[in-house]
Image (cartoon, rainbow, N blue to C red):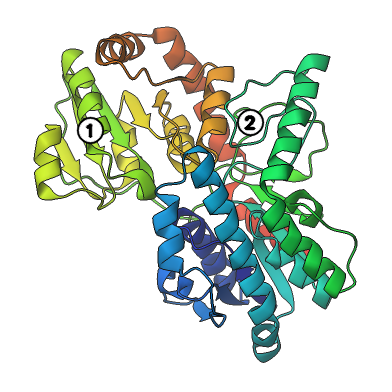
Amino acid sequence: MARIAILCPPYFSHVRLFEVLGEALVARGHQVHFVMNAGGEDLIAGGTLQAHAVPARAGDPSAERVLKNAERSTGLRGVLRTISDSAQLTKQLCEGAPALFDRLGIDAVLGDQLEPAAFLLAAHRKLPAVGVAAALPINRAPGVPLPFLDWPYDPSPAGIKRAAGGDRVADWLSSKHYAVIEHYAARWALPRWRTLQDCLPAVQISQVIENFDFPRPQPSPVTALGPIRHGEARPGTLPFTPDPGRPFVFASLGTVQGGRWRLFRAMTRAVHAAGGQIFVGHCGKLTAREERLIGADFIAGFVPQRAALKLADLTMCHAGLNTVLDSLEAGVPVVAHPLAFDQKGSTARLIHHRLGERMQLRQSALNAQVARMLSDHGLKNRLDAIAQTVPAAGGITRAIEIIEAALAG
């Protein structure tokens, strides 16, 4: 039995993934402790999982502020603000987590790729560690643009050069976060780590599937497992019944960006113009008045996403990885409007594999796009083929096997 610390950023979708892993590890007899930034412990659902917060320090951003800033993370200013928040969160964990590790007797670490404190602490304490890509993997490879870029995959010399240039720009933008990594690596006499990539451990897992990601040199340092869910997770049931005689469209902008009611209204108008019906899931981000203004056939904060996608003919979304993977598993094409984080990278991969398109923003063009995609039988055939590969990737069962093997040394 291991006493495992989980460290991840205080973002809803990241926490939910680690809760699934944590609960599966507890069921296997391990002790699992979330070690969170101050205020982040409130995101943990409880039950069999224990959450502990490191102390807040003067000037640290609150978890609430970090989440609020994430809603405005577009544009250069938003990116720099997100990087600044991330640097402070990493520093807070590096300062406060060692005492928690001692008190809890931590002997292994499960960390988010985006939180280098997990791997700095593991190296400092000489503990086994496993990295998890809750979003698109950040691992660099020739011709593969970074996840937050919507550039196409290009293995030509020009494409490799362009991707490397993007890496250099990202390193410059991330200098504040990298300074924190360098500081603790030096303080703890670790290898000369500087970037997020430097901190990644030997064993890493991801929710992507290989035939959705861009091609990477093999063997890859990241094992692609597909969606990681509870072993017996079922799609659930819906509180409404779509008309089976009309195309049904699922629309979501995720837990962070779900308040964009004007965008939902444009989607609704396009679906209605194509003779379809639409469900809008806003994750609790809209008022009752905004719900009415959208004019959707069905609207709610949350419904079981996989249950809705089982009935869907099209997904219209922000290209968040969970929504994209659930759509691919259901064989549903995606119209993507990336807003932040790795959503541009997900959109580029949808386009690369001809599994979806980037959303047209002019209403007449969006109307035509939705009508065309609802009638594209070639697209449906490609999606049916990829849907069969998702369960075979291994999911939660393979994830726990890999984690336990790594922790056993």
* Residue in view at x 82 percent, y 33 percent: 218
Q: Which residue is mark 1?
A: 262
* Residue in view at x 50 percent, y 40 percent: 321
Neighbours of disc 1 within 10 Å: few (<14), some (14-19), many (20+): few
x then y, percent, for residue 344: 53, 31
Based on the displayed image, in which of its 4 quarters is residue 57 positioned?
Answer: bottom right
Q: Is residue 246 visible?
A: no
Foreground: 281 or 400?
281
The disc labelled 1 sits on which kind of residue?
Arg
Task: Using the image, determine if residue 259 lies above or below residue 15.
Answer: above
Q: Quadrant of the N terminus?
A: bottom right
The disc labelled 2 sits on which kind of residue?
Asp
Q: How many marks?
A: 2
Left or right relative to 114: residue 287 = left
Foreground: 405 or 59?
59
Which element type, helix, strand or loop, lies under badge 1?
A: helix
Left or right relative to 211: residue 76 = left
x then y, percent, for residue 83: 59, 53
Foreground: 358 or 354?
358
Mark 2 or mark 1: which comes first in sequence? 2
x then y, percent, for residue 94: 69, 74
Left or right relative to 297: residue 351 = right
Q: What label does residue 305 carry, if any?
A: none
Neighbours of disc 2 within 10 Å: few (<14), some (14-19), many (20+): many
Identify the residue at the far bottom of this view.
103
x then y, percent, for residue 123: 82, 69
Q: Which residue is mark 2?
A: 213
Q: Quadrant of the C terminus?
A: bottom right
Q: Is residue 364 visible?
A: yes
* Residue in view at x 84 percent, y 74 percent: 187
Which element type, helix, strand or loop, lies under badge 2?
A: loop
Task: Using the image, determine if residue 167 lies above or below residue 227.
Answer: above
